[in-house]
Image: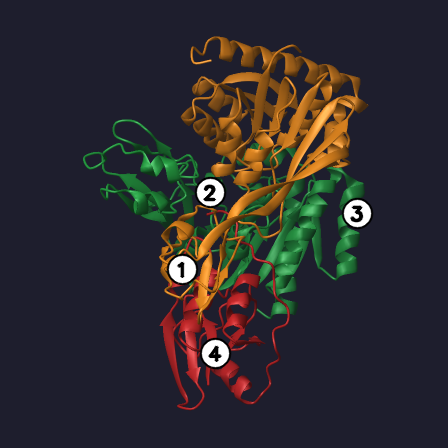
Amino acid sequence: MHQILILSGKGGTGKTTVASAFIKLSEAKAYADCDTDAPNLHLVMGSYEQEQKRDYRGLPKAVIDPDLCINCNKCYEVCRFDAIKPGNPYRIIPIACEGCNYCTHVCPVEAIHSEEAKVGDLKLLKRNNEVFSTATLLMGSGNTGKLVSEVKNQLKEVGSEHEVAILDGSPGIGCPVIASLSGVDLALMVAEPSLSGLSDLKRVIASARQLQVPVAVIVNKYDTNERKSAEIEVYCYKEGIPFLGKIPYDKMATAAINRGKTLVEIESLGAGAIRTIYENTLQLMKERIHI
Amino acid sequence: MIIAVPAEEKSLDSAICVSFGRAPVYCLYDTEKETSTFLDNKAAEAPGGAGIQAAQFLADQKIDSLITFRLGENASNVLSAANISMLKAPNLSIADTIANFLEGKLSSLNEVHPGFHHGH
Amino acid sequence: MGTKATIAVLSGKGGTGKTLVSVNLAAVAANATYIDCDTEEPNGHIFIKPTIVGEYVVTEPKPVVNQDLCDGCRTCVDACAFNALALIGKNLLIFDEICHSCGLCTYICPKGALREEQRPLGIVKRGRKNGITFLSGEMKIGESSAVPIIKALMREQSTDLVIIDSPPGSGCLVTETVGNADFCLLVAEPTIFGAHNLAMAHELVTLMGKPSAVLLNKTQEGENPSEIYAKEHGLKIIGSLPYDEHLALLSSDGHLAVEEDEHYHTYFKELLEAITKEARHASDSDPQR
């Protein structure tokens, strides 16, 4: 399975728009949404015949047994995360609890234990022989590299016979991004032509290079700032990073997405540009990675 | 001596896992007995500090060398304290990597990365 | 303005125009504090270009071992929920960046071999520019949690009007900024992606019992799913900011639109008035205040 990961550094640059178009163009039968903080890919992928769901559990959190609690206040005194609400009985505020277990150890009547709280759902969607791996987190739970790894593992378990897999990545350069980069054949960076877009792009490229993942760059909405777009192109040239094309700002793109369609399902300026980028990507994979 | 390699699967044909701390398994090769064993990495499940926990686990197994693509600073500190040498992984299967090691073809891993341990 | 109000600007996801709205609101106010809480990708300084006038170090307690007392029993290593400790032989290694400063190891050590010391976690910078007080937090590279820095930033509020540029997502960092706000301004794009993110942000502020309203950003002709969401869920629409090439260009070059364009000066001035009015109204009708 050859994996193409779509990344950006900065949020909101058009990763999901590119990823969904790539899925359509490549007729990929295996794909995943690694942006578990704000998963969006499912919104343009239509409906599925089958959905398998299982609980995703994060760091254990404290739970107070109301029948055993003697309101001695010891847990409240030691907790440094303001996660204990005094009362009768005392309660844990799950959103604040970091699961350190200090309260568990000081409780004189063993009224506190820790439980691996459910923090989200891992989902595997299927139709025909297509598989889509994704996850959702409950409110107030942060994304982790572990969840991203599980989304990818789930895809690998059922989709390994497929030739190409498309992964929609998450923004930033943190642990989730590192987890999404591991083992991919190409990281395609969708850059935004702005000062902040360029600085975030450089940071995410540095992360990918540390992991020896081949990178390539495209610019989305390039005509919103052609000077910055050219700067990104020059940067890629100097760094020896393949530059695979640029997509114009396209009002039709918004309209297509709002109808739950990918960009390439409508005739538009952006669709033509993405087709060219897709062909360039295939060419690059053939030349450099020998697929 | 015992060398460890993070692996994707419990097979000598497996690829080396790119991630050290979150590798699903480690292959341990004993150069005297010429045997290899695969151990599950419990740290792969850890929400945070996986590299440290994995390094502690390998130090407890009394390994002498680790072959990996990439290593976080924290894991590297644990391994250094345990006098475990760190070598740069080639882009090969586990079996070929071990063969390369025995032929003395691997260089030491001198690039250590700052960790990326965000979130919890 | 004369009104004391702390306004958190958030979006559920990056790239919706959160920073653009925050910096322009701060710039148009006569006397305001702008706080950049996006510690992973802080971009507010690109627009405000403040002169940094002071900074201080944020510290957290971290365990320190007395190796003479430690007998290598490993109790602390096994108890630490964050894997911040390792034991090699009799040598205890402590990883400050992984440590959450919970204090358990120090409490639990049977030999009393651990004590806590304040260690730097990051810095808070204070700057000034044309009446704006600028605050931003910078984490030491590799630190695991920015929560203490956000907490430190939240303590710094010195003017009547405070604009908080929240971090993206809906995790613990956002709950920290929202918890300190009187009012939340949600910024949403006109796509189904935008509406989905808006729903997440709206769910979070509702969960935390904070009054909120949405600013529809980059609006254009045709259906706006974010607008539909707001109407269906009784979320007040406080304004629309139509997509404008000129505004996009100004922002991508790091300019403040309110300083470059009279139209946007008026626009953000009116938006700010509408927001402070909402915030005041919300605090008047809240009996707890």
Position of residue A239 measured from the top left corner of the image (x, y, whole percent): 75, 60
Mark 2 or 3 closer to N-term?
2
Q: Which residue is mark 1?
A: C77
Q: Which residue is mark 2?
A: A142
Looking at the image, residue C96 lies above or below residue B29: above
Q: Which residue is mark 4?
A: B94
- What separation in Å lies between label 4 and label 3 (alpha carbons)? 43 Å
**Parent chain of label 1:** C
The amino acid sitting under disc 2 is Gly
1 vs 2, front mark: 1
The amino acid sitting under disc 3 is Ala
Residue at the farthest front position: C68
Position of residue C64 measured from the top left corner of the image (x, y, whole percent): 50, 55
- What separation in Å lies between label 2 and label 3 (alpha carbons)? 36 Å
Position of residue A38 measured from the top left corner of the image (x, y, whole percent): 49, 40
- What separation in Å lies between label 1 and label 2 (alpha carbons)? 25 Å
**Parent chain of label 2:** A
Secondary element at image label 3: helix
